[in-house]
């Protein structure tokens, strides 16, 4: 049982999909012009048309494919989706130079299956509006600035709403989507962590059969959950490799081992390659050079392990649904090469693996729910991301064991203070802007200080904490001064060779989150 969402380019398209999934109905996002056969392949029980930036009168405007109206399925058009529906069925959409953006008070004209009770406030973001409804439609809601806020044709089960039910600013938005799914499309709430697992296990078994699978775990949420899922499906056919690059945070290797060993047992292989990495990085301080060396060293180490473990034709990848959706619409993904991102756990291109992607259809919150259901510890599931090149990009200048030790100790003090204050590594509430990432970096800058009666001339630790939704942009976090003071005190007192602590107050852009 599923719903198809046709994406007309709204910034909220993925959010619609997440909301539908939260209502326990499986859905898939398709580009609006995807072939009908692809959209109908999963036998959807309804179609949602997303919003989008176009105007139905533009010459190259995205259109409503014929099968949408002919397939006898319920349709919900949101914003541009409603205008398309009106336009295609003979109504009138009028362009408007005035944009309506923000909360709007609306009036319910007729109670109906989609909006059975007064809802008052909704979130609008549109230019054009429906001036005249197509034949067969009834006016459901209106507002002083927008004559047709909601319209419906109950017989054909076609509905249109000008506002956005998927955003939190529409207080009853979830209820409206729920009504569309349960009352109008007749869906059942069947998409749960357990059903996702059952589904994924079946798919993995079908793809892999009795052959063996290799997985690279980084300790991050996605690779851990993907590995645990494959293990659930295949048991002893899986071998997982965790490479200790020598560039991990304090206690990281142990915590990854503690989280995964109970699940994977002797099939978890922890490889200490720190000497290999550190000698490859000797005397290197250029950021891009560091990344390249780490990337190639990782592949080399990984290949050695793959050979050692024998014939493993499949490789697990932790690709998640937003990656799949974004890569289909490259013009909308913000992929810009500011830094070469080498994801530890990334695919060695020269190796001849078939790929298993058990999270390919899941959003991050679903990945987390599955991880919990599979028994992975909460610290791992709610953990902040850590870059593939690890501490190398936080240890500016030369990478030596001594400098890494300083950095690790300072970072651990910062992490501990934030964790004790409940600011990181925890489940976040909807609408909250939590700290997305926090860390220490070591600068190759020495400054003069005084400790006791002694002059010091030592290096600097910079603390960085940011809030961010998507890591494409970020704001520096306004941490409490008392917390910063306590962390600074502890670092200069406890970490040898550091006599100054500063706090980074730049956002991204113009800075980036990591220092290199
Ligand atoms: P920047 O520094 O570009 O970071 O603002 C954005 C996000 O990406 C992470 N990051 C990386 N992740 N390999 C990764 O897997 C990398 O090479 C890498 N560089 C940055 C960074 O930690 C932040 O979450």
Image (cartoon, helix red, strand yellow):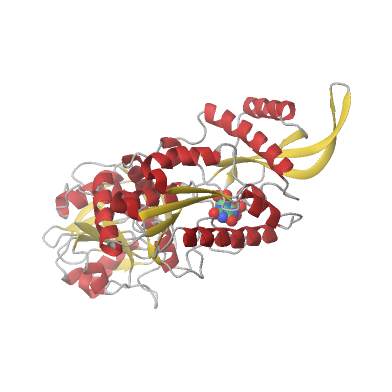
Extreme residue toward the left, this view: 155
Residue 47 sits in quarter: bottom left
Quadrant of the image containing the N terminus: bottom left
Extreme residue toward the top, this view: 452
Residue sitting at 36 percent across and 48 percent down?
A: 228
Q: Exactly how many numbered labels are in the figure? A: 0
Extreme residue toward the bottom, this view: 59
Q: Position of residue 283 (x, y in %)?
A: 76, 55
Q: Is residue 251 visible?
A: yes
Residue 319 sits in quarter: bottom left
Q: Nearer the viewer, residue 317 or 262?
A: 262
Image: 124 above or below 65: above
**In the displayed structure, does residue 162 sit left or right of residue 154?**
right
Q: Is residue 113 visible?
A: no
Q: Position of residue 214 (x, y in %)?
A: 42, 58
Q: Nearer the viewer, residue 195 or 307?
A: 307
Image: 234 above or below 482: below
**In the displayed structure, does residue 293 sit left or right of residue 112?**
right
Q: Nearer the viewer, residue 297 or 346?
A: 297
Q: Position of residue 57 (x, y in %)?
A: 36, 73
Residue sitting at 59 percent across and 38 percent down?
A: 477
Residue 169 sits in quarter: top left
**In the displayed structure, does residue 467 sit left or right of residue 153?**
right
Q: Position of residue 260 (x, y in %)?
A: 42, 42
């Amino acid at each position: 049982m599923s719903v198809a969402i046709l994406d007309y380019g709204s910034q909220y398209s993925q959010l619609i999909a997440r909301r539908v999934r939260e209502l326990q109905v499986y859905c898939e996002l398709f580009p609006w012009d995807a072939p009908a056969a692809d959209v109908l392949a999963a036998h959807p029980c309804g179609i949602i048309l997303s919003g989008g930036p176009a105007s139905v009168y533009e010459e190259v405007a995205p259109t409503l494919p014929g099968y949408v109206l002919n397939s006898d399925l319920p349709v919900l058009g949101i914003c541009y989706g409603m205008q398309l529906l009106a336009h295609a069925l003979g109504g009138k959409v009028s362009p408007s130079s005035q944009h309506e953006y923000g909360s709007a008070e609306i009036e319910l004209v007729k109670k109906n299956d989609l909006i059975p009770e007064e809802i008052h406030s909704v979130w609008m973001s549109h230019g054009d509006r429906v001036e005249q409804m197509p034949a067969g439609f009834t006016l459901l809601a209106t507002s002083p600035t927008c004559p047709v806020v909601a319209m419906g044709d109950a017989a054909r089960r076609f509905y249109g709403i000008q506002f956005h039910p998927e955003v939190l600013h529409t207080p009853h938005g979830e209820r409206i989507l729920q009504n569309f799914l349960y009352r109008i499309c007749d869906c059942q709430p069947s998409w749960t962590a357990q059903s996702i697992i059952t589904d994924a296990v079946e798919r993995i078994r079908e793809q892999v059969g009795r052959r063996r699978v290799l997985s690279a775990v980084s300790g991050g949420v996605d690779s851990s959950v993907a590995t645990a899922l494959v293990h659930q499906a295949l048991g002893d056919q899986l071998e997982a490799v965790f490479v200790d690059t020598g560039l991990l945070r304090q206690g990281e290797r142990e915590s990854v081992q503690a989280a995964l060993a109970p699940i994977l047992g002797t099939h978890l292989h922890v490889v200490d390659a720190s000497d290999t990495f550190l000698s490859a990085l000797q005397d290197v301080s250029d950021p891009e050079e560091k990344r390249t060396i780490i990337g190639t060293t990782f592949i080399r180490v990984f290949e050695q392990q793959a050979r050692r473990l024998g014939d493993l034709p499949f490789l697990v990848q932790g690709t998640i649904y937003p990656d799949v959706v974004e890569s289909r619409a490259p013009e909308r993904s913000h992929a810009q090469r500011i830094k070469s991102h080498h994801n530890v756990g990334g695919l060695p291109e020269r190796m001849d693996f078939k790929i298993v992607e058990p999270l390919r259809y899941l959003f991050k919150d679903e990945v987390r729910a599955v991880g919990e259901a599979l028994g992975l510890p909460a610290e791992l599931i709610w953990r902040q991301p850590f870059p593939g090149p690890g501490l190398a990009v936080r240890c500016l200048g030369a990478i030596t064991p001594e400098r890494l030790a300083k950095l690790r100790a300072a970072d651990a003090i910062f992490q501990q203070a934030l964790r004790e204050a409940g600011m990181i590594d925890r489940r976040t509430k909807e609408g909250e802007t939590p700290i997305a990432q926090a860390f220490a970096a070591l600068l190759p800058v020495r400054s003069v200080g005084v400790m006791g009666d002694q002059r010091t001339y030592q290096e600097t630790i910079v603390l960085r904490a940011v809030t961010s939704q998507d890591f494409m942009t970020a704001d520096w976090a306004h941490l409490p001064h008392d917390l910063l003071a306590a962390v600074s005190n502890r670092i200069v007192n406890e970490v040898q060779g550091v006599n100054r602590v500063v706090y980074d107050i730049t956002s991204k852009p113009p800075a980036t989150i990591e220092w290199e």
